[in-house]
Image: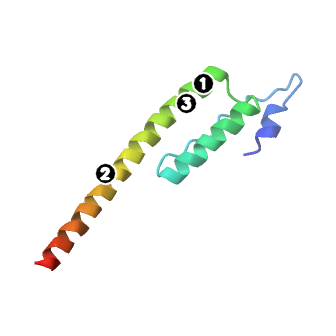
Amino acid sequence: MDLTALAKTEGPEKKPKKMPRLFLHNLEASQRSLGRLIRARSFGVIESQMFKDLVYGLNTYLSYAKAQNEAEVLKRIEALEEKLEQSRV
């Protein structure tokens, strides 16, 4: 999406500014969406309050995803430690 073109629309035939799409299906896509939001705000595509609300929600979502990933890693570590204990016996 070319945000510079969206931000520079002028004149009586002003097109509505498009909101950037948010992809939240995985952590990497969510991080890219955050970058899209930052660029959209810097070019004036979205208003300040909308930006704050979306970033807050996205931050909450990413924190949850991070906690979920950490829990999965801890389960894998525990399983490996258990296998290690069993092999020692």
Left or right: 32, with 7 as reference point: left
The label nearer to you, 3 versus 2, is 2
Q: Is residue 59 above or below residue 31?
A: above
The local crowd at label 3, few if under 14, some if 14 to 19, many if 20 or more residues have their Cα within 10 Å, is some
The answer to which of 23 and 73 lies nearer the viewer is 73
Asked which secondary structure carries label 2, the reply is helix
Query: Could you tell me which quadrant the C terminus lies in?
Result: bottom left
Residue ID for mark 1: 50
Type of residue at label 3?
Answer: Leu
Q: Is the C-beta separation of discs 2 and 1 under 8 Å? A: no
Work out which residue is located at the far left of the displayed protein and give it.
89
SS label for mark 1: helix
Is residue 69 placed above or below 81 in the rendered structure?
above
77 with respect to 5 (left or right)? left
Rate crowding at label 2 as few (under 14), some (14 to 19) or many (20 or more) other CA atoms within 10 Å: few
Q: Quadrant of residue 2?
A: top right
Q: Is 79 drawn above or below residue 42 in the view shown?
A: below
The residue to which callout 3 is attached is: 54
Residue 71 has which mark? 2
Q: What amino acid is labelled 2 in the image?
A: Ala
The Cα–Cα distance between marks 2 and 1, rounded to whole angstroms, is 32 Å
Quote the CA–CA distance across marks 3 and 1. 6 Å
Q: Are marks 3 and 1 in contact (CB under 8 Å)?
A: yes
